[in-house]
Image: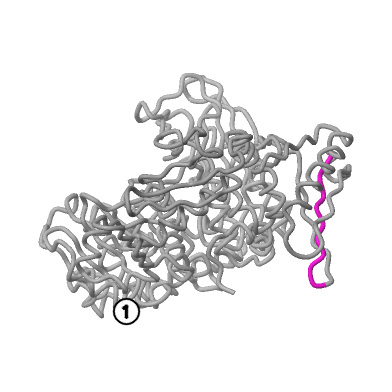
Amino acid sequence: TGKEDDFAGAAGVKGFVAFINRGKTVLHPNVFAAMGDRQSDQGTNIGVEVAMQWDSGYSEEVLCFTNNNPLRDGGTHLTGLRAAMTRVINKYIDDSELAKKAKVEVTGDDMREGLCCVLSVKVPEPKFSSQTKDKLVSSEVRGPVEDIVSRLLHDYLQERPADAKIIVGKIIEAARAREAARKARDMTRRKGVLDGMGLPGKLADCQEKDPAMCEIYLVEGDSAGGSAKQGRDRKFQAILPLKGKILNVEKARNEKLLTSNEILILITALGTGIGKGGGVGGTPGADDFNVAKLRYHRIIIMTDADVDGAHIRTLLLTFFYRQMPELIERGHIYIAQPPLYKVKAGKEEQYLKDTAALDGFLLRIALKDASVQLGAEGSDVLSGEALADLARKHQQAESVINRLMGFMDAEALRAIADGVSLNLDTVADAEHSAVALQAKLRELNTSGAPAEVAGEFDERSDKPILRISRRHHGNVKSTVLTQDFVIGADYATLADAAAAVRGLIGNGAKVMRGEGERRKEEKVVDFRQAMRWLIGQAENATARQRYKGLGEMNPAQLWETTLDPTVRRLLKVQIDDAIEADRVFTMLMGDEVEPRREFIEKNALRAGNIDI
């Protein structure tokens, strides 16, 4: 498949924490690591490994394992860890009188802001809360974890005063921010924003009161929101238009969240509250996040199919992932898939979700009453499913070429689809392939000097490659074809299309479409020319409308395409790899510019919708 997975195990849980924190701004260089064995009160031997490091972010990431099995909901080992952290760090802060000087009261939540932690225990015959093994309930585990972490964390803070100062500074800053957020909550509560008594004026609520039957669309823009309000089913569908781009919560604390009007409107509409420890002294408050108060069990993000729409969708996903992750875990978040095209051919009218669907529609129209005469009069004629099979292979090859031509030589890809076979097993094989590809490129070249192809050994990859060089406006542009490409799926698609039509078309061949007086035909020299003509005929027979935004649809069209549960397409947001999800959100939405720049430079040419 060309896909690679790397499994790392160096340095144990300490190395795991360093791996998770790559791309983040870590606050202290020395990862805290503790390891040990303890006898539990029941006499069993409990093995404990833990590593912790704080970063400049605001979210907590704690990964718990029992006998190497990941536990989503933690358990007694996590309880022991938190108890040890709270006791040891609070004592360190009290002894240094830092909290007293800062005039704040520190809570356990403050200590875990920006914390990355991996906790692993080895337990004979562990007990779990359910068959899914999401939570450890073995009571004998808490004591050994608390004992080992307490002793070694105390030593760490005493022996590394520079690291301790940074960690405690982060914790006190978090406590100050929590207090500021509490005051902001009080202010918004007095205004009636968070108490749920007054719903936002922009919200068009539904009539149904059972949350399990209700859904809310978060719609980009007032224009599309207005159309959605008119087109919806008022019984169970609520509409909340969102104006502009919401706050990037990856870079903001709760006190800033609570000053963002669009965020407050969203929180109020959902009814769950936000955050934790909003009460006095960090105890649970009435406005804290509570999934039981969710007013809609389907939350559907509906944005335009352009760059701004993708950005707004990403900001909303970041908000839910960082502030309300339980909504994603419980499967409440969806992404609407409004159509990009409306097409009409004769009496047939369809909405199509993307360009690939449009290509499929045009191919179906093109093949209606179509046939290809393979040579002069009297030669075999290709039609029906046999023609459709070759046409689909051709279209798949064209799709590969269109996708790769942004960063690979388009004519070289075309040459492979025309039958040039490449072999990069050795440098000699690469040189032979270069000669064959060079000859085909000279044949295909229609303007300017043809490309120069060379087979050579690449020292960086330690493998043979093909280098294709073209001179363009005085500059030389090079494309490299690697062995990974030659053994990959894209090359196989091109080669398969070439093999399917090799030697198929002879002299005097022609393509035909239609019946009786409406029959049209065209002489062709190869199958690609025949397909180009057929697709052109289909395009001429098709009326096409491309929706640049949701606001271009009227209420009836929005219902037909995006609101009607019987025909709409929704994507459920799921997280299969929590570590990778955290890395991606941190890289794309966080403060560090360099990892984001590297990602853009690596993937920009692969993107299909870039604003320039």
Mark yes or no: residue 1 visible.
Answer: no
User: The residue under label 1 is which amino acid type?
Assistant: Met
Q: Quadrant of the N terminus?
A: top right
Magenta-tinted stretch = 464-473
For label 1, the residue is 187
Q: Quadrant of the C terminus?
A: bottom right
What is the total number of numbered labels drawn onto the structure image? Answer: 1
Residue at 33% x, 60% y: name it: 343
Is residue 186 one of those drawn in magenta?
no
State whether residue 104 is above or below residue 93. below
| Residue 58 in picture, x, y percent from top left | 52, 62
Q: Is residue 439 left or right of residue 157?
A: right
State whether residue 530 is above or below residue 70. below
| Residue 297 in picture, x, y percent from top left | 24, 52
Q: Is residue 560 left or right of residue 303?
A: left
Magenta segment's dominant SS is strand
Is residue 472 one of those drawn in magenta?
yes
Q: Is residue 447 left or right of residue 172?
A: right
Residue at 39% x, 28% y: name it: 128
Residue at 25% x, 62% y: name it: 271
| Residue 540 in picture, x, y percent from top left | 40, 62
Name the one closer to the observer, 12 or 214. Answer: 214
| Residue 89 in picture, x, y percent from top left | 57, 54
State whether residue 372 is above or below residue 186. above
Q: Quadrant of residue 37?
A: top right
Query: Dot 1: what SS?
Result: helix
